Image (tube, grey):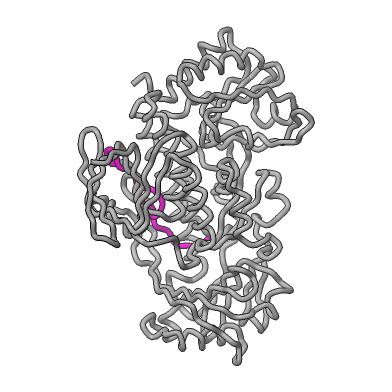
Amino acid sequence: MEEVPVLIVGGGPVGLTASILLSQAGIRSLLVERHPGTSIHPKARAINARTMELYRQCGVEDAVRAAGIPHHHTGMIIWAQTLAGEEIERRIPWRATAQSGTVSPVRNCLCAQDYLEPVLRTFAEQQGPGALRFSTEATAFEPQKDGVVVTIVDRNSGEQQEVRAAYVIAADGASSRVRRQLGVKMVGRENVYDSVNILLNADLTPWTAHRPAGLYFIENQKIRGTFLTINATDRWGFLINVLGPFGYTAKELTPERSAELVRLAAGVPDLDVRILGVVPWTASALVAEQYVHGRIFLAGDAAHEMPPTGGFGFNTGVQDVHNLAWKLAAVLKGVASPSLLETYNDERRPVGQTITEQSLANASSMGRLEQTKKNASARPEYLNEQGMIFGANYASGAVVPDGTDEVPVANAVTDYTPSARPGGRAPHVWFERDGERISTIDLVGKGFALLTGAQGRAWGEAANDIARMVQAPVTSTRIDAAEFASAYDIDDDGAVLVRPDGYVAWRSRGAPRDPSATLRQAMTSILGLRH
């Protein structure tokens, strides 16, 4: 029987990212995907800045951007009666503004999933020690005391074999077989509205090039839908948001009928359109009651299914495995207690719940739940969700509280105030090092990072002691910049310990009498070694 530390079920962006992160942590994994290759449909397109920070730290950011389209093609959101007709409204989302650059050194990216997945697959295959097997389906799971026995089937040959995995990541989508076999209850609202995605070739630049946007919402008395920018020239998606009130059904949307509706929405009766695919789907707003089931972990759409309004599904899933991978690595290397893995549910499920609820609120404000012919404008929070993108605050055993209060914000969806309070994302601050301008974001992501003030030399020795204790990288960086001390709210001799996923685990405003003992105590708590 083949044995592997981690088996990943699902080869979409979430599974592929998990493979990359585990490989870079030195953990061998096996990814199985039932399809013969990566996605052939655009599906998700929006990669937010927090996810791009992750890809920057992995070393794949440039390749992802090269596969996507430049920012100047996606700077606005447009509402119009038809693509060639009267414009109703336009917005510039916060994500596209210069202000977003004050929060992160990277910007969001628009890269359709069928362009993104080949990039991630190639990168994952280059990493090692992870392995990927496509056309391979996981069909049965038998949890045992010391692992999970998984039956996998080669869909080409029909050959069946068993694999024993210490842990399993279920990233197999909204219809997750793993989740169904576990009998996991999903909480929320199912089947809240129907939609149809139409993939097409047509030159729409005469009506879009002068007002580049990521989304063109079409609203009139005959159709309500959205043109989705893919390459900003001749490859587009068209999402029919409302069916019944306009007399349409998914079954009748043949390629010929779909082309007619695209011309109707474009307002160009003789538009040359080639339909590449028609995919009906139903939106739900559901979250798994529990993400951790013994040695099996739900991630991505297997853990939370949300309306796409806001573009959070893919991003939330990728950030799920970012949270999980370093914890699995620590446990598998024997430097952390298995109790650390329970914090995955404690930290990520509340985030998934909140984002699912807000995605549903976006959809509701746009009239997709109570479907009528009456046009509806998106709420102000739509695509201005910097609080949801950057503002997660974890409370779990993997965080050591420092007694400070959470930074209050007027609107937790839209507002984000950078803070190094334990449990929050380590803030981005520019500083000079060896004549080079770098971000604090570039100091994290490879093991634990200890960031100290200008007088924090003693912390460097403490970091070396801890690195020997946990047998893992613990880098220490002194930052002589007033902006850093202010943003991280520490004195010149203070320190902040940042986890491999970029979240603050512990903070000391100043230097204690014994930095090594203090840091050792913090790390012991974070890794669950007291339990």
Residue 409 sits in which quadrant? Answer: top right
**Who's the residue at 65% across and 24% down the image?**
477
Relative to 337, residue 35 above or below: below
Q: Position of residue 137 (x, y in %)?
A: 29, 56
**Who's the residue at 43% across and 56% down the image?**
12
Q: Is any part of residue 122 visible from this angle?
A: yes
Q: Nearer the viewer, residue 516 or 467?
A: 467
**Who's the residue at 37% across and 56% down the image?**
134
Q: Is residue 394 left or right of residue 135?
A: right
Quadrant holding the N terminus: top left
Q: Is residue 45 left or right of residue 85?
A: left
Residue 324 sits in which quadrant? Answer: top left
Q: In the image, which residues are magenta?
A: 293-310
Q: Position of residue 248 (x, y in %)?
A: 42, 84
Q: How many marks?
A: 0
Farthest front residue in view: 157
Quadrant holding the C terminus: top left
Relative to 272, residue 278 above or below: above
Instruction: Indicate whether residue 102 is drawn in magenta.
Output: no
Q: Is residue 429 left or right of residue 498?
A: right
Farthest bottom residue in view: 270
Q: Nearer the viewer, residue 366 or 317?
A: 317
Relative to 374, residue 416 above or below: above
Q: Is residue 246 left or right of residue 229?
A: left
**Who's the residue at 39% across and 53% down the image?**
304
Q: Is any part of residue 410 visible from this angle?
A: no
Residue 405 sits in which quadrant? Answer: top right
